[in-house]
């Protein structure tokens, strides 16, 4: 019998990943070639959609967006990573003078900022590249975290990022997470989710995460204060403030387990693609 063995792991964004996903759902890792042909035809007919996941900081958006994209074989884009990459560029090029940003210079240099994502075969997830250099770790440092908010508030930075994000989503089959994806980047997305959790719960999660990494100097009340501050900045900035799109589904994950959240999200995806389980 002519059988083809399929690898169990997947994680890139290629169309054939749909095949792995569908097969995984059927719990079949070995199938006949004829089945593959008909399955491929079926998959081609499956409607690809755009999924926008927005919400407050530290509520697990990226993890859920990444997991969903992997499960359904979609491209995953972390739009926050793009703003972080611009902040890193500004730091490295001396565009910050203390807390002040030389906005005229940054605006002039924006055309030199090239951000891309490439699949990391080890993690199965996309890494962020700035002008051809892998900056995935650098953009997660405290220094970048502390400087990214004012960069993300600049209109010309947002315009450039939104343009790139819309380009990335042209072919659909994309899950993008951020703050303005359902409202500004993809206002026509077929599935929009707005994620939230109480500030206390988000602060506790962040605290546990940092403690697990060995940081014993953190204080829960400081983190809670930081969460509240970031919520305020995100919701009150002039350009594209964080808000739930009218047609977004609200997901308060304060009391949900990761598994419950994942099941809920998959159900919404199946509804949006008319494949209700
Ligand atoms: O999600 P994050 O913490 O990596 O986001 C980094 C910063 O970018 C944060 O200040 C919020 C901002 N951001 C934004 O303004 N719009 C987005 N679509 C994504 C992130």
Image (cartoon, rainbow, N blue to C red):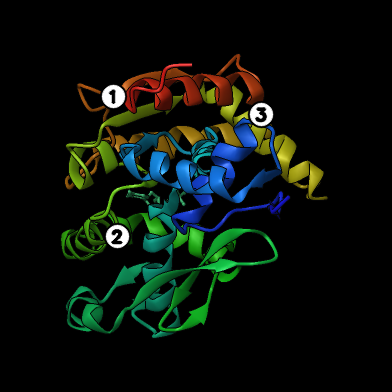
- Can residue 51 be seen in this snapshot? yes
Residue annotated with mark 1: 248
Sequence-first disc among 3 and 2: 2
Q: Residue at horizontal 31%, vertical 57%? A: 152
Q: Which mark is residue 204?
A: 3
Ligand 1 under 8 Å from disc 2 Cβ: no
- Any mark on residue 168, and which? 2
Front residue (pair 84, 91): 84
Q: Secondary structure at mark 3?
A: helix
Mark toward the viewer: 1 or 2: 2
The residue that appears at 31% across and 69% down in the rendered structure is 100
Residue 146 in the image, given as x and y percentages of width and height: 48, 58
Could you give the CA–CA distance between mark 3 and mark 1, rounded to whole angstroms?
26 Å
Where 172 sits versus 113, above or below? above
- Image quarter of residue 21: top right
Crowding near pointer 1: few (<14 within 10 Å), some, many (20+)?
many
Please give the name of the residue rendered at 28% of the width and 42% of the height, measured from the top-left corner. 181
The vertical placement of 276 against 149, above or below, is above
**Does label 3 or label 1 sit earlier along the sequence?**
3
Nearest the eye: 167 or 11: 11
Residue furthest toward the front? 1
Decide which of tag 1 and tag 2 comes sooner along the chain. 2
């Amino acid at each position: 019998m002519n059988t083809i063995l399929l690898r169990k792991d997947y994680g890139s964004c290629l169309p054939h990943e749909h095949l792995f996903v569908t097969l995984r759902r059927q719990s079949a890792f070995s199938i006949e070639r004829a089945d593959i042909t008909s399955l491929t035809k079926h998959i081609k007919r499956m409607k690809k959609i755009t999924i926008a996941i927005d919400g407050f900081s530290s509520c697990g958006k990226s993890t859920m967006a990444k997991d969903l994209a992997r499960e359904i074989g979609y491209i995953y884009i972390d739009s926050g990573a793009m703003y972080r990459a611009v902040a890193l560029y500004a730091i490295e090029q001396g565009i910050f003078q203390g807390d002040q940003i030389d906005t005229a210079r940054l605006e002039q240099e924006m055309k030199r900022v090239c951000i891309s994502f490439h699949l990391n075969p080890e993690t199965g997830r996309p890494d962020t590249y700035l002008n051809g250099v892998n900056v995935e770790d650098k953009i997660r440092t405290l220094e970048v975290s502390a400087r990214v908010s004012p960069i993300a508030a600049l209109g010309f930075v947002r315009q450039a990022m939104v343009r790139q994000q819309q380009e990335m989503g042209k072919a659909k089959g994309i899950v993008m997470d951020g703050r303005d994806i359902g409202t500004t980047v993809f206002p026509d997305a077929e599935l929009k989710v707005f994620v939230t959790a109480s500030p206390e719960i988000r602060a506790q999660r962040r605290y546990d995460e940092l403690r697990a990494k060995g940081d014993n100097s953190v204080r829960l009340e400081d983190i809670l204060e930081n969460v509240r501050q970031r919520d305020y900045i995100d919701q009150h900035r002039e350009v594209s403030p964080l808000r739930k799109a009218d047609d977004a589904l609200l997901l308060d994950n304060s009391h949900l387990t990761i598994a419950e959240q994942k099941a809920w999200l998959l159900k919404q995806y199946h509804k949006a693609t008319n494949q209700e389980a």
